[in-house]
Amino acid sequence: MTASAYSRAQKWFLKYQHVFVFTAPLVFVVAVLTSAPTTGTTDVTYWLEFWWLFPVFLLGATIVNTVGISGSALFVPFLIFLFPLFAQPLEPETIVKVGLISEAFGLSSSSVAFVQYGLVDRRLALTLVGGSLPFVVGGALLSFVIPEPLFHALLGLALLAAAYLLFKTNLDHGGGTDSTATDGGAAVGGELPDDSGKLGPAGVETATDGTVTRVDREGDDYTYTRAGYLRRAANYSVGGTFQGLAGFGIGELGLISMLGTRIPVRVAIGTNHIVVALTAVLASLVHVFGGGVVGGHSLSLASTPWNMVVFTVPATVTGGQVAPYVSNALSTRTIKRFVAMLFGIIATALFLMAVGLG
């Protein structure tokens, strides 16, 4: 395929990405309804039992994708504390699996939306994903054998760390992080990149000195470098372990590390979506198939609560598409502080559970 043909194909895909994004959960639901292995009866009552999860996960997916953090950071605590009030309690590994499967679809949806806006640094994302993979797999395998009280304690620590980092970090979309990383500013002289394969005036080019100039589809420009690989690698390794173990962590710690290495805010959020989405898919696969490898809880496909994910997956995909529009309409700082306070409350409850008081 020639470069011009590839550009036309890319532009066509981005223009109609909503069709492809919403086709994926439809195919998933049909496949589950027709061929997913289950235990017990699978009548209409079984499949409609958890219909009420759709609005809950839609709201959660919209919130986390607007801020740029892992969906399981809200989904997992919800399944631990609130879900048993309306249904039966779930095992920790099942909770993480449902959260990861839902998150993988939701973040994939949101990632495509951010790519469409021209806010994803694909070179940076692929580097971060490659370095995180061993830690994600290790954390996911560890989740099969770790004691439940320790699981709750580690989950609480991860939430506290995420809450602190969210409070400390400026996620407002306007203004740069410092003088060397402009974020969404107007061009002052000079010719900006405009790639034929992108929608609107979007484009990206890297100078010989490593300076990246990026323009999104609205015409806002971003200037930065990709320096700071070691610092980001350290954060993504720790975050990757928690991502595999609890279903979140890489998004929160990764976002902080990118902002700390002077990646513009909107580019950091967009790029982080790709990293979290790909690692969530990997962690989901390990949680589904990896139990027998470490001699822990072997989760067969039949043990997956399919009547839950048939509603959570479409909900998170929809939330992922809505998030970019919400992020432009609402104050990200307000949403960020709400999520951070919620993390603190949930972490406290998890610590009480860990010591047997919950």
Image: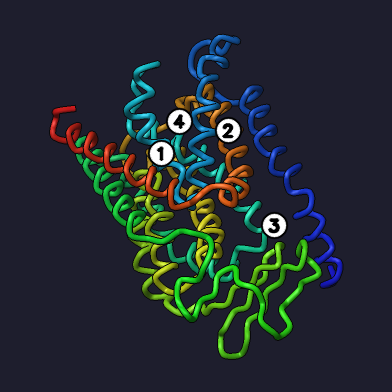
Q: Note whether 228 is above or below 129 in the view shown.
A: below
The amino acid beneath tag 4 is Ser
Q: Residues within 10 Å of mark 1 (few under 14, many from 20)?
A: many
Quarter of the figure with residue 314: top right
Q: Which tag, 1 or 4, sits closer to the chain's start?
A: 1
Q: Which residue is mark 2?
A: 315
- In the figure, is residue 33 to the left or right of 302? right
Q: Which residue is mark 3?
A: 116
Q: Residues within 10 Å of mark 3 (few under 14, many from 20)?
A: many
SS assignment at label 1: helix
- Is 159 or 192 nearer to us in this picture? 192
Q: Which tag, 2 or 1, sits closer to the chain's start?
A: 1
Mark in front: 3 vs 4: 3
Q: Which residue is mark 4?
A: 300
SS assignment at label 3: helix
SS assignment at label 2: helix
Give the spatial CA distance, label 1 vs label 4.
Answer: 25 Å
Q: Which tag, 2 or 4, sits closer to the chain's start?
A: 4
Mark in front: 1 vs 4: 1
The amino acid beneath tag 1 is Leu
Give the spatial CA distance, label 3 vs label 4.
Answer: 37 Å
In the rendered image, which quarter contains the N terminus? bottom right
**What scheme was used to colour the molecule?**
rainbow
Q: Which tag, 1 or 3, sits closer to the chain's start?
A: 1
SS assignment at label 4: loop
Give the spatial CA distance, label 2 vs label 1.
Answer: 14 Å
In the rendered image, which quarter contains the C terminus? top left
